[in-house]
Image (cartoon, grey):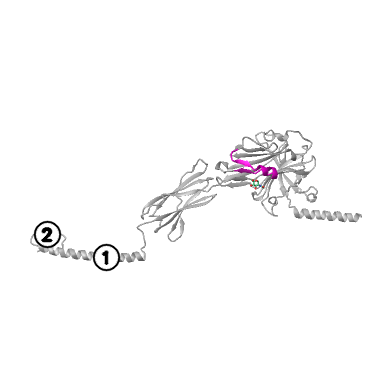
Amino acid sequence: MTSISTIYKLSLVAVTCFIQACSSSCPVLDCWFVQEKAGRGGGLTPPTTQEKSLLYIRTDANSHNAANHQAPSDINPDRIFFITDPAATLCHHSLSPPKGSIKKPQCEISPFLQQPSTLQWVAPLTDSAFSPIYLQADWFSVALQGLNKERVISSIVRAPTGTKESNVILSVTSKTISVQARLGKPALLDCGFWVDPSSPLSGSGFAVEWRYQFRGKGRLVLAYDGKTDRVADAQEEGATLDFESLHKKRNASLILQEAKVQHSGTYICTVYLPYLLAQVVVELEIVEPPSLSIHPSPLPLIVPGQTLTVQCEASGFAPLSLELSWEFTGADGKSRPLETGSITGHRQAWDGTYSQSTRLELDTSKLDLGRGGELTCVAVHPGGTRRASTTVSVIGFSTPSIEDSMAMVGVALVLYGLIKFVSWTFTSSDYSRNDALSSTKTEVTVWPNSKIKLA
Ligand SMILES: *[C@@H]1O[C@H](CO)[C@@H](O)[C@H](O)[C@H]1NC(C)=O
């Protein structure tokens, strides 16, 4: 009887281990344990200490394989955490770098102080006092950034006082650490969260807040109290949440209906539970490539030796990062770069987009433009490369074609005939005139170049 039950138990353990090994690739995370130094220092930010830390992640508290790991000797045993995450948020593949990889996910764990919030859209969550015993535990906040900026995660974990077995209670994540959006198009800033359904905090509602930050200035974009289903008055125009998706799938993504240049900056998605909060940071950049125009258009015909000034204007672009250059494509189809031209300072339009231009002195005495070709203005921008072309025609310069040569021979022949005819007519009329005037001497001086000498 005992042997059977032992075999049964052993096989169960084996199967569990097998399932654990195959199904979950939950990482062991190298982390920093960060906390404020005891005793307050001066200055605005209190001094902090950093210690090496290790987080063993698992999806099931009953799996013991994590505990079997030999803890490295250089890590304080108090800084080793066993975290159970039933949602497997912390098991995302971007947190498990391939073996031998130099790049590591970023991880920071620090003590978390749970407290009620006085913010107007959060306060209703702590209206009714509930079991404060649940709060009496060790709380930590874990901040993670996966490889290749695939994901940011912020989790609040709870460990019953004195134990090292902690559980994820709240996780906030974003798939879009940095987002680029085109001007005038909708922009989506991803944010989602998960709450431990077994936590007494899970049924008490939540609140979501989006804040904007740029060069030290911050403002509220949108705040939503999920308990009373109310949006704060300060809501920014054109910013919204998908409320159905928020309640059904805990999808707190911010939707900006029409991206403007002024929307570029840092956004913070904060999710509140009663006494708890977790937040992730997302960057938005509005990227719009320029429109190009060449002046004058069309270009006037150029005579060899002449200098022509051509201007190329790039407008409506953002951010302010542009390289303008010129290219010339000859009749043979080969293109070559020309000098950069002189770039003007930038101007900013009412919508926040920029414009800038370049002026090229097209000196035909220095440049070999042949019979002409195509002049192209090239703009290299983070939003893409744009080109604009115009035709250059050089006149008075042509290598004659066969038809032209034939025509010229024809013209030459006609001219020759004409000259012959004219000279014959003149010569004969001269003779006749001289004959007529031979008697008067005075007339001779009037025709000094005449070949005919009078006796
Ligand atoms: C969240 O909601 C937005 C807006 O409706 C949607 O585009 C996005 O795909 C949703 N994300 C998830 C993970 O469901």
Horizontally, residue 147 falls left or right of residue 185, namely right
Local secondary structure at mark 1: helix
Residue located at (83% from left, 53% from top): 13
Q: Are marks 1 and 2 in contact (CB under 8 Å)?
A: no
Q: Find out whether residue 238 is within the magenta segment.
A: yes
**Hey, what amino acid is under mark 1?**
Val
- Vertical placement of residue 297 versus 243, above or below: below
Pick whichever of labels 1 and 2 is earlier in the sequence.
1
Residue segment shown in magenta: 236-256
Q: Residue furthest front?
A: 244
Q: Find out whether residue 55 is within the magenta segment.
A: no
- Residue 143, x across and y down, in percent: 69, 44
Q: Nearer the viewer, mark 1 or mark 2?
A: 1
Q: Residues within 10 Å of mark 1 (few under 14, many from 20)?
A: few
Task: Tell me where residue 441 sits by quadrant.
Answer: bottom left
- Residue 446, x across and y down, in percent: 13, 57
Residue beneath disc 1: 414
**Hey, what amino acid is under mark 2?**
Val
Q: Which mark is residue 435?
A: none
Residue beneath disc 2: 444
Task: Tell me where residue 197 sits by quadrant.
Answer: top right
State which quarter of the image contains the N terminus.
bottom right
Front residue of 442 and 299: 299
Q: Residues within 10 Å of mark 2 (few under 14, many from 20)?
A: some
Local secondary structure at mark 2: helix
- Residue 294, x across and y down, in percent: 44, 50
Estimate the spatial distance between the alpha carbons at disc 1 and disc 2, rounded to whole Å.
34 Å
- Vertical placement of residue 47 versus 397, above or below: above
- Vertical placement of residue 390 versus 247, above or below: below
Horizontally, residue 345 falls left or right of residue 56, namely left
Front residue of 236 and 332: 236
Task: Tell me where residue 237 sits by quadrant.
Answer: top right
